[in-house]
Image (cartoon, grey):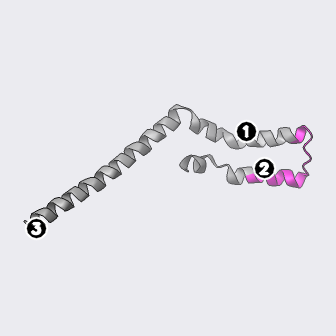
């Protein structure tokens, strides 16, 4: 009787683990589909250039950036606004 109970408990545990894993995979797939369908991945891909354009527009409108500061800001955009990383997180 004890071995039957242990067998059933192991079977239930294995089924629970596989179900949790399957639900997580389905949820991630649905989320990826939703992100794609609503155009968020396209917007994320455009973000670095949009941020750079905003920085340039600010400079054109009188925000006082030295050339070195401008280069640092633009390099920071390239370093930190990585669409693939933003979408993964």
Residue 68 is drawn in which quadrant? bottom right
> What residue is drawn where x is 34% and y is 52%?
21
Point 52% across, 37% down: residue:
35
Residue 12 position by quadrant = bottom left
The residue at which mark 3 appears reads as 2
The answer to whether residue 34 is magenta is no
- Cα separation, mark 3 vs mark 1, equals 66 Å
What is the distance, in whole Å, between disc 2 and disc 3 at their CAs? 67 Å
Residue 18, horizontal then vertical, whole percent:
29, 53
Name of the residue lying farthest toward the top: 38
Could you tell me if the residues under marks 3 and 1 are in contact, i.e. CB atoms within 8 Å?
Answer: no
Read off the magenta span: 59-76
Q: Which residue matches tag 2?
A: 74
Is 3 rendered above or below residue 64?
Answer: below
Secondary structure mainly formed by the magenta segment: helix
Label 1 residue SS: helix
The earlier-in-sequence mark between 2 and 3 is 3
Q: Is residue 30 left or right of residue 67?
A: left
Going from N to C along the chain, the mark reached first, 3 or 1, is 3
- The crowding category of the residue bearing disc 2, from other C-alpha atoms within 10 Å (few below 14, some 14 to 19, many at least 20), is some
Looking at the rendered structure, the secondary structure element under dot 3 is helix
Q: Where is residue 41 in the image (x, y as percent from the top left)?
A: 57, 39
Q: Which mark, by number, is residue 50? A: 1
Q: In this view, does 14 lie to the left or right of 44?
A: left
Q: Which mark is residue 18?
A: none
């Amino acid at each position: 009787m004890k071995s039957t109970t242990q067998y059933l408990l192991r079977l239930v545990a294995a089924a629970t683990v596989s179900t949790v894993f399957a639900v997580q995979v389905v949820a991630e797939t649905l989320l990826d589909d939703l992100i794609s369908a609503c155009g968020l991945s396209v917007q994320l891909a455009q973000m670095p250039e949009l941020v750079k354009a905003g920085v340039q527009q600010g400079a054109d409108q009188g925000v006082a950036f030295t050339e070195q500061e401008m280069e640092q800001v633009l390099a920071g955009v390239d370093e930190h606004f990585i669409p693939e990383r933003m979408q993964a997180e």
